[in-house]
Image (cartoon, helix red, strand yellow):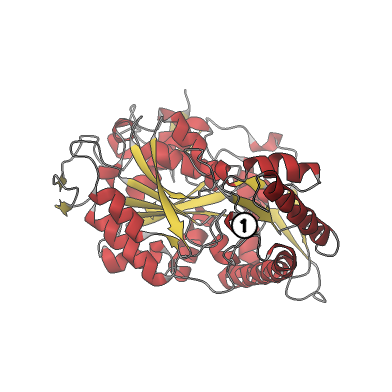
Amino acid sequence: MGDIETGSPIPFKVPSALATEGAEVTPKSTTNGTTNGTHVEKGFSPRDFLSDRAKVTQIDGIRGLMAVEGPGIVSAGRPNPTTFPFSSITLNLKSPLADAQGKEESITIDTEDLDIALQYSPSPGLGKLVDWAVGLQSQVHNRQRDGKWTVSFGSGSQDLMSKGFHVLLNPGDPVLLETPIYSGVLPPLRLLNAEMIEVDVDSQGLSAKNLERILSTWPEGKKRPKVLYTSPTGSNPSGCSAPRERKLEVLEVCKKYNVLIFEGDIAIDYLATELIPSYFELEAQVYPEGGHVVRFDSFSKLLSAGLRLGFATGPKEITQAIDVLTAGANLHTSGVSQAVTLRLMQHWGIDGFLAHGRSVAKLYAERRAEFEAIAHKYLDGLATWVSPVAGMFLWVDLSPSGIRDSYDLIRHEALAKGVLGVPGMAFYPSGRKSPNVRLSFSIVDLDQDTELGFARLAEAIKDKQKALGLA
């Protein structure tokens, strides 16, 4: 008697099919790189992008056996569910954002769905929720459910991005980063001692020209980057959104130099007043075989940040490698968080979820318009910014004031006047000087605090100009 009781034969060792890709561990040589970095694909497999460790790491014996559970096989390694003191979970829903007069509703998680949520569950996520997410991605991003790509759940998109970097990068590897960049991307890369290469944005997001310049002049003989991270819609912090044509340009450059894209939209896509085709959708126009984009989504901005629930979508060889890390680190994402989300998605359906996203986008767009109007009142002539079509931030450039480094102004003078922002240097891996400051309009009081805040910020900027002899 052990972890498994069965009337059928079970392998004593987890087979290599339960390793990272579901294929044998022996490395395959399927791509060739030339000296200038361009490459010719021969039997391409996304597995070629995996790090050395990910190629040989297998899921542990107990977790691996979950893949062979089924009729005639009884698992005895889990807690007896009769000891769990919960019979149901009832969720009381607010009236829809789009219908203030709408009725409040209640939905319940019970019976089999609750039993599954309270028990140990598969590392990729609850089966019903994974299937729902695959359906969502197929509909929103116009991707066929061809079995080449799948979805894996994690404790927020940051958890999944961290694991994604770990399954693709060896310690010290170079990685291409859209800059300015969401600072939460940086800690796992620092743990890997990655060489972080900054690729600056322009008003339309990640610059394909800057990317081409970096890759075309890459030093001969130096290990080349194989991953690019970008946040293409309402980017945090820049607010920029890459249009369809720009994304195709970036995809062409990535194809030329054999670079895989991490698309970190973290559900900001759904906060756009109009959905823009994603890299995950557009990749088929450049890579007919697919497999070159891993997309990260989150429910934090749409349902609840405290649920800590996100999902990665991409080639199964890479998402399954992420699952192996999840199995070893935290077994699986909270079953209760997944069950709450699943029950809500069952209630709403995909169309209902998208309708909620449009309502959230409308709320933030209205707040942005009010926030920007007040910003223009006080900062015109002192600062500029890109008006974001999604997200919840303004990336304010103080260069028109003659200020080249916002750090002291924001951390000292502005803070002393009661204004809190984030200095631009926090969003560059190199910590380089930046004239920018990130300001948020998500929850600030628009009636009084915003007016007062911008008046004080303008005053601090003018004081700084005087101190620097610029006025």
Query: In terms of depth relative to the viewer, which is nearer, 226 or 267?
Result: 226
Image location (x, y in percent) of residue 152: 46, 49
Q: Residue at x 47, y 60 (%)?
A: 232
Residue placed most toward the observer, 175 or 5: 175
Q: Residue at x 48, y 39 (%)?
A: 429
Badge 1: residue crowd in 10 Å (few <14, some 14–19, many ≥20): many
Quadrant holding the C terminus:
bottom right
Q: Is 319 left or right of 310, judged from the image as shown?
A: left
Residue at (31%, 36%) from the top-left corner? Answer: 51
The answer to whether residue 173 of the structure is visible from this angle is yes
Q: Quadrant of residue 335?
A: top right
Residue at figure coordinates x 86%, y 61% from the top left:
448
Decide if residue 202 is on the left or right side of residue 421: left
Q: Position of residue 296 (x, y in %)?
A: 48, 53
Q: Answer above or below: position of 98 versus 317.
A: below
Q: Residue furthest right?
A: 448
Camera-nearest residue between 96 and 369: 369
Q: Position of residue 64 (x, y in %)?
A: 40, 35
Q: Amino acid at mark 1?
A: Val
Q: Which corner quadrant of the image does residue 427 belong to?
A: top right
Is 306 positioned to the left or the right of 77 in the image? right
From this view, report whether residue 340 is shown above or below residue 364: above
| Residue 115 seen in the figure | no
Q: Percent position (x, y) of residue 344?
A: 66, 61
Q: Which residue is mark 1?
A: 396
